[in-house]
Image: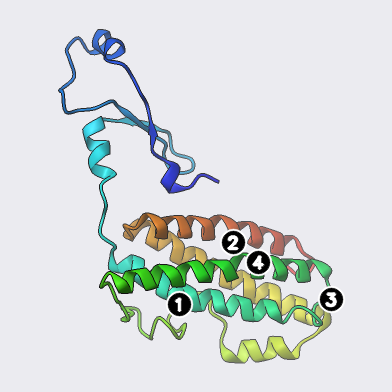
């Protein structure tokens, strides 16, 4: 998987190679051109060195970045709650294995997001208001979140019925997380948050495909 922080690939072209093609010396402050790979499915393009240097300059964290991380923590926590129910309830061992993978990936991601928020708080960037309604820390107003009633029903189920409910709820949950990640990739500015969102999109898309391939899917 290509991470945004590695998208900048410097194309070190010498002046001797550039002069014959353009017929005139490059401005002294332009710097070497930079080859910038596009997003998945998009072609790479060449960017003037001066523009690349400006884009690599630090960009302030946006409210969208802060809100995404604050909302994604309880979103991940609910996924862990559902995953913890699989042991002893699921009939399909693939469901148990999927739940273990979810726990192994999302628990460390929560720790990373919490550390990122603590760093933003130290820098004076607190943000606790959710424009979509609800409070970002309680999980309300987020796509894909299971209701308390649905969680109770999942906890009470067992065997194939648990598998069916788990796949249904977790698929919706993952789709919600992908929607949130897609939004912040457009509206956010922080490179670390962008990397988090890219990871969520790739990892959870793969898990959705696996769930849809299961008999319960």
Which percent across, then down, holds residue 92?
A: 83, 71
Vertical position of residue 80 compared to residue 207: above or below:
below
Mark closer to the chain start, 2 or 1? 1
Number of numbered discs overlaid on the protein picture: 4
For marks 2 and 4, give the CA distance.
13 Å
- Quarter of the picture holding the C terminus: bottom right
For marks 2 and 1, give the CA distance.
16 Å
| Front of the two marks 4 and 1 | 4
Q: Secondary structure at mark 1?
A: loop
Q: Secondary structure at mark 3?
A: loop
Q: Which mark is residue 142?
A: 1
Q: Secondary structure at mark 4?
A: helix
Mark closer to the chain start, 2 or 4? 4
- Quarter assignment of residue 56: top left
Q: Residue furthest front?
A: 122
Q: Residue at x 26, y 44 (%)?
A: 55
Q: Which mark is residue 104?
A: 4
Mark closer to the chain start, 3 or 1? 3
- Quarter assignment of residue 215: bottom right
């Amino acid at each position: 998987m290509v991470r945004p922080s590695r998208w900048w690939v410097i194309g070190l072209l010498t002046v001797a190679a550039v002069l014959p093609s353009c017929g005139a010396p490059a401005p002294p402050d332009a710097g070497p051109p930079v080859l910038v790979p596009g997003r998945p499915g998009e072609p790479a393009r060449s960017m003037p060195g001066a523009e690349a240097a400006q884009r690599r300059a630090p960009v302030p964290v946006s409210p969208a970045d802060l809100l995404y991380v604050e909302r994604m923590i309880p979103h991940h926590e609910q996924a862990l709650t559902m995953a913890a129910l699989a042991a002893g309830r699921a009939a399909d061992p693939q469901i148990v294995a999927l739940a273990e993978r979810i726990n192994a990936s999302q628990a460390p991601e929560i720790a990373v997001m919490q550390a990122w928020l603590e760093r933003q708080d130290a820098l004076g960037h607190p943000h606790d208001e959710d424009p979509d309604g609800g409070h970002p820390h309680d999980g309300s107003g987020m796509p894909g979140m299971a209701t308390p009633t649905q969680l109770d029903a999942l906890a009470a189920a067992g065997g194939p019925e648990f598998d069916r409910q788990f796949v249904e709820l977790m698929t919706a949950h993952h789709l919600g997380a992908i929607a949130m990640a897609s939004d912040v990739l457009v509206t956010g500015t922080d490179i670390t948050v962008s990397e988090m969102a890219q990871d969520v999109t790739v990892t959870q898309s793969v898990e959705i495909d696996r769930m849809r391939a299961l008999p319960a899917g």
